[in-house]
Image (spheres, rainbow, N blue to C red):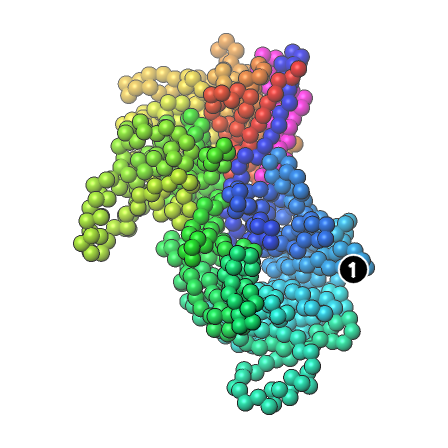
Amino acid sequence: MPAVGACSGAMKVHTEYLSSGVNQMRLGMDWGTDGTVCYAANTGVLLYDPQLRAVTGASSKHHTKRVTCVRWVQSTEEGSHMIVSGGADGKAVLWTVSGERTEGLHVLSPLSILDHGDAVNLVDATVLKVKGKDAVLVVTATTDFITTWLVCHESGTHEQLHSSAPPGNVFPLSLRLFEVPGAKFPVLLFGGHDSRIHILAARELGVYHSVCRLCGHEDWVTSLAVMKEDEGGLLLASGSKDATVRLWKLSIIRDRSQQEEEDASSQELKLKSITFEIPSACEDLVMCALLDAVLAGHEGLVSEVCWAKPSLQGNYGCHIDADDKLQAAYKLLTCSKTQDRCIIIWEPNGDTTSSMWLEVARLGEVGGNMEGYYSCQFNSDGSKVLGCSYQGGLHLWEQQDSVWEPRVVAGGHFDQVADLAWDPRGRYLLSVSKDQTTRLHGGWKTGNKVLWHEVSRPQVHGYDMACVTTLGKYKFASGSEEKVIRAFTAPANFIRNFGNICGFEVEEDIAQCEVGEGAAVPSLGLSNKAVTAADLQQEYQVQAQGKEEVQAYFKPLALSAPPTEDQLMQNTLWPETSKLYGHGNDIFAIAASSDGSILASACRAANNIDAAIILWNTTTWHKLDTLAKHRLTVTQLAFSPDDQYLLSISRDRTWAVFVRAVNDKGVTYRLYESVTKKETMHSRVIWSCAWLPDSTHFVTASRDKTVAVWGLTESAWCRKALLNESDEVTAVAVTTLHASQCVLIATGLVGGDVHLIRYNPTESTFSSEVMKVTHKHHDSVRRLEFRPTLQGTPDVSYLASCSSDNRVHIYRINITKST
């Protein structure tokens, strides 16, 4: 057992950073009235605060497949907030948001889970009073059924009220609940593939029947939004695949006979209105639906429509009518995910009673968004617009002096994150993903705070990324599902902006930069080409002469805040400095020595030849040597901290240690020791490994649910300790604990859990306490990596993790000595 106090002391975990893209769904995000955005991120739901510019909350894991739709539920009288989500796993979950933060984030806990037999495509919910108590009416739509549920707000118990096929067996594409003053229950709208809008009302709670159909669209009705007018009427906006948006006025007819007389006596030419009845507690309400306007501004499918009603305070967006009454001008937001790739803001011409609507702004016309915008949202007063693009990125605009300016917004990978690597000095973090991008995350210094954010996208590739490693300051190499390893070096424009954003002194680094100002991908090219100052000068001369640009060169940026999504997509690439050929299959693992002078790489393999490890000289980019030992794919490579050893692990359930040596080509490595499948003690594939700081111990993590520590004794490596985990171990990392003689080991499991445990190398024992991180991943942890220790922070460690759930996390771990 370890000495008393040797491995004791408190650990406190804080989620410093959470990054993830938005699911590519039309209903993937919703902006709440309190200013918080909820959005679907793979199998979970995240909260994002545009004011704080950070993710502020995360759901626990309950969906087993992608979340297809999310909606805020109106607040109850007690002020609690709820979200409802639907998933491809056939579940709809009603979430409650915790008031206090746990480990740095609000927790979304499930109040009730509603099981379906098919994927839930649409969902909406509202709070109502049932027998004097708060209850939540939830409406869900699958391919074949529309189902209503009642959930008790206090206990979370639920009952299925009614389930039936949509009228006419229509496939529902959009769905909305809304309140009608005086109606007995909320009214339900849905649009389908029959090009009609169906209005359903209930005489009994949850049992809806069709009362009206609005015709006019010529193709699928894909989106619906309802807003209450000042006069008490309702405005309905409907978007369609026919590229138009139709506005309908819904109003209550108080005296039907008087209305008929007025219509008969009127000589004006009017559009035909449709009347229908809505059940109420007393006499049924008679409502009238009238087409008010048709907006034709998009060139393809309208993916979402959204209303905003600016506040009357400060006269923002307001006007004075004939009776000197202050009224707010309504705003309508529409977006398309097809040809025109834009978001349009509409406002009525003159006053709120006008049927003439004008396009006042068009946002987001970016060539990179080839599939346009899946979703768009106004904030509560219409002063900000949030869009979600095909790449899962968020785009934020804010109105300043009648001009819509892009703003900094959170983002992240929209597919599985395969690997990550810290800068040798811990100043930034690199991550690679199956979304075919490499992203650089840095700490944005704003006042006394440091907010982690994506500050560059050095590589946008044509293949799914698999692995990454740093080669020193501002250099890295990456591997993907191709046979080539690519190396990159930071350009001067990035280094300059990085210093401004993150508060580092970079003048010396800029002076030493030799790759130019930036990078661009040439026409019909596949590699990032360096753009020098001379190239930029030539481009300016071409523009001055009025000639057409031959090359879409990068545009230099001068930033003091992280770049927007548009800037990340176009102007933050790094030049590619070298390509390394030698492997016969897709690259799977790479690692570099601490000084970045030697690069080791391995590819997918099913035989001895392909499983060979290749060593590269990163100065000359020549092959140094080939190391043959394993029979199957090498899953990870790791150099010891002193670069004396190279460790490799494999799918063949064995590990091998190579020792530093010298040959006629320079430094190389020779096999020092390896184990057979029997000796390794691991009965399944070894997924991950890491060295202890002393370079004489290393850790292996396996699918057999064990973590083994191996140490050098005289001339052999022996197993020192074995830790049994609750699930398959897919990632492991180690760092020094300055407060004691122990080290801290982090393990990542196949289910997404991240565990922290102390290990005493002197006594070869693990501590009895295992800390489990609350905000864990929702899928297999692919890599864990501790940040290189920063000066002046001996009691703080930072752990980065990435997962198949598309997320990148950075945890701050505060460690205190025991008394």
Quarter holding the C terminus? top right
Above or below, 590 against 308 in this view is above
Residue drawn at x 21%, y 44% as measured from the top left: 537
Would residue 690 appear left or right of 580 to someone viewing this image?
A: right
Q: Which element carries disc 1, helix, strand or loop?
A: strand
In the image shown, does 626 or 267 lie closer to the viewer?
A: 267
What residue does disc 1 label? 130
User: Looking at the picture, how far across and down is residue 640, in whole percent?
Assistant: 45, 20
Q: Specify start and end residues of the magenta stretch as a single range.
A: 752-778
In magenta stretch: residue 765 = yes
Answer yes or no: is residue 480 visible: no
In the image shown, does 649 or 529 lie closer to the viewer?
A: 529
Q: Residue furthest top?
A: 714
Above or below, 700 against 548 in this view is above
In magenta stretch: residue 132 = no
Would residue 734 appear left or right of 164 to someone viewing this image?
A: left
Above or below, 593 against 514 in this view is above
Quarter holding the N terminus? top right
In the image shown, does 550 or 82 lie closer to the viewer?
A: 82
Above or below, 769 against 301 in this view is above
Answer yes or no: is residue 210 visible: yes
Residue drawn at x 50%, y 9% as measured from the top left: 714
